[in-house]
Amino acid sequence: MKYILEICAGSLGSALAAQQGGADRVELCDNLYEGGTTPSSGMIKTCKSLLNIPLFPIIRPRGGDFVYTDQEFEVMKQDVLCCLELACEGIVFGILLPDGSVDIERCSELVKLSGDMQITFHRAFDRCNDHKQGLEDIIRMGFHRVLTSGGMENAEDAIPELSRLIHHANGRICMMPGSGITPNNLSKIKATGALEFHTTAKTKIDHVSGIHPNNLDTPYLFQTDVLKVREMRQILNAATAGVNH
């Protein structure tokens, strides 16, 4: 058994930092400030050429809610096919109906389009009106994992609910906690019984010196921190060694 560390990367630099720090997988997003939207095909292709760990782009045409128009759904279908063509190992998506239930019809269509790629249902799950029913629907459609914060803003605040969801899943699907996971609380969240963990492992960095202020939208950037990734990898490696002995 091995604990899996997935890094949510919002840039090429973050994806490379994730790999350097020892992450097992990258979820690739654009617009992390909106919760993540689909990265460009150029970004996906470049990451695929530079990474030797699995790459899972998010399929999300915009921020906001998870109820999409027919036109937006068409965009999602094309993006799934793009990821398949670029040989991505997996994709991440989730679609809800206006009442907060899982949109089984549309999600099933994307599952069929995904071919051999692994599929993760993202934190739209946390907006479901019934977590247990939503989980059953997701399992029935053939998803491999669910990314969830247990319905709370941060996973650390939802440890009892995460434990209940993992118990309810009973090995039928991977329940992957995410949101606010750091080296300081990873062990606590691991106690839920989770085997995979999702985090940005981000840190604030200054822009390269010499850039004129007029060229800056903000005075700093957030990027995945190699040292934070490495620290969490070490925590999980130690836990893996303890279990296997």
Image: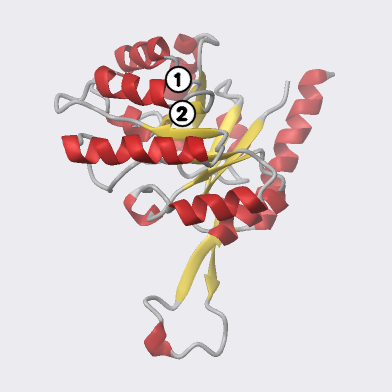
Q: Secondary structure at mark 1?
A: loop
Q: Residues within 10 Å of mark 1 (few under 14, many from 20)?
A: many
Residue 178 seen from this side: no
On the image, the x and y values in percent for residue 28 come to: 50, 47
Residue highlighted by disc 1: 143
Residue drawn at (50%, 38%), measured in percent from left and top? 85
Residue drawn at (23%, 40%), measured in percent from left and top? 72
What is the tally of numbered marks visible in this picture? 2
Q: Secondary structure at mark 2?
A: strand
Of 114 and 245, which appears nearest the observer?
114
Residue drawn at (32%, 32%), measured in percent from left and top? 124
Residue drawn at (51%, 58%), measured in percent from left and top? 11
Residue highlighted by disc 2: 120
Report the amino acid beneath label 1.
Phe
Report the amino acid beneath label 2.
Thr
* Farthest-out residue, right: 245
Give the CA separation, mark 1 to mark 2: 6 Å
Q: Quadrant of the C terminus?
A: top right
Q: Residues within 10 Å of mark 2 (few under 14, many from 20)?
A: many
Of 71 and 206, which appears nearest the observer?
71
- Discs 1, 2 touching: Cβ within 8 Å: yes
On the image, the x and y values in percent for residue 226 come to: 67, 56
Of 40 and 125, which appears nearest the observer?
40
